[in-house]
Image (cartoon, rainbow, N blue to C red):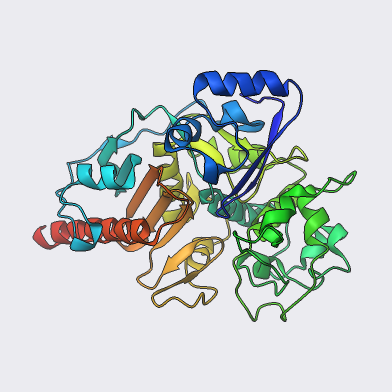
Amino acid sequence: MSLSRSLSLVALAMVFILTFTGCEQAKIGFAKLAGLPTDDNVLFWTNSERDKAFRQMEVLTATRSIEAGETPRLVEQGPALTLSLLPEVGADSIEQYMENQNTAGILILHKGQIRLETYGNDYGPEGRWTSFSVAKSLTSTLVGAAIVDGYIGGLEDPLTQYIPQLTGSGYDGVSVKQLLTMQSGVRWNEDYTDPESDVAKFNLVTPEPGVDPIVSYMRTLPREYEPGTQWRYNTGETNLIGVLVSSATGKPLADYLSEKVWAPYGMQADAEWILNAGGTEIGGCCISARLLDYALFGQFAMKGGAIAGTSVVPEGWFDQAGSKQADIGRPGSGYGFQWWTYDDGSYAAQGIFGQGIFIDPARELVIASNSNWATATDPEMSKQRIGLYRSVQAAIDAESATQ
């Protein structure tokens, strides 16, 4: 489970820094023997190292458990889905698609039933796999839970009300909603090739006593635009959302996620959430969970965040969270509350190297997938994955037409 080695990671930013503490040499030796990476940057890991590491990140890093409940949710097996892949998928079969994508698992839920579940790369249903930035969407959901519980007053509350250390910084006057939609207006450089960019430096800050490391860095940044006027992808701000939730609730993110969703919704197994150098969960990254549990989280969101008739988040939360709140300059898509959105009403959580949860409320459809792409981001791989989503939608529509 948790080891005394902490990880500082820029989710979806392709910078992955592992900071060793005690017994460093012993752990390096263990990693070498196990075929696990010892380099501190995921971009330089070999495919084999990533394949081994992605399924057991908790071995490499300090984590906190997201505890499941005593009664796992029963999920019915539905009829096998008849699937014809569209040309943009670049494959004639789901097996070929998985080979092209180096996919560890795909699971499709339709109306609460498993319609397709398949695995590769010696991965199976009881294994965990890292989420990377898929965690962003789970973290944003905890903001909604904290509003229902009265820990956060509402989306228009100023961020400094909950993180007073940001008072006087570029985040003074920024609302909770503007943080959720990455429209703070604070200057940020997410150039992964520039060693002087914010995304390259913000995890290297020396923690200050009593201040989360991400706050120490983010409060040094100046404002560039008026809040709410410009969208800019900012990994650091997702980590601030994690600080917002933990500060408001007084609870670790892993514990709060367990309390509000993981245990009561009946996830199949405990998950693990990686900690930063300050010993707190990285809000924007790196939950390790089973594929079915990722799919079940998608189902929870698709159903509006209700458990046993009681809504965990405010009424209509996912209608807002999963719809375009910010224009990202791409036709047909946008950004919600830490979800990537599509104009047809579907939305998705996405992580580097091919992790994803796709949700289509109109079709009662969820697609969860874990992969190990050759590179952190790849336009062609993304195009193929979207093609798979559209192929599944077409298959569901074809079924409905014949019923």
Q: Residue at x 53, y 42 (%)?
A: 44
Name the image quarter holding the N terminus. top right
> Which picture quadrant has residue 226?
bottom right
Number of numbered discs overlaid on the protein picture: 0
What x and y, as percent, mark residue 62?
Answer: 67, 31
Residue found 51% across the figure and 20% down from its top: 34
State left or right for residue 178 relative to residue 168: left
Residue sitting at x 26%, y 61%? 390
Which residue is nearer to you in this view: 20 or 256?
Answer: 20
Identity of the residue furthest to the left in this view: 402
Q: Is residue 56 visible?
A: yes
Q: Nearer the viewer, residue 295 or 13?
A: 13
Q: Residue shown at 48%/78% (left/top)?
A: 329
**Is 180 displayed left or right of 293 in the figure?**
right
Q: Which percent across, then down, holds residue 148?
A: 64, 55
Q: Position of residue 304 (x, y in %)?
A: 47, 56
Horizontal and vertical percent position of residue 256: 65, 41
Residue 303 visible in the displayed image: no
Of the pair 196 and 73, the residue shown nearer to us: 196
Left or right, 80 with respect to 375, comes to left
User: Eyeballing the image, is 399 above or below 316?
Assistant: above
Where does the C terminus fall, quadrant-wise?
Answer: bottom left
Q: Is residue 78 left or right of residue 213?
A: left
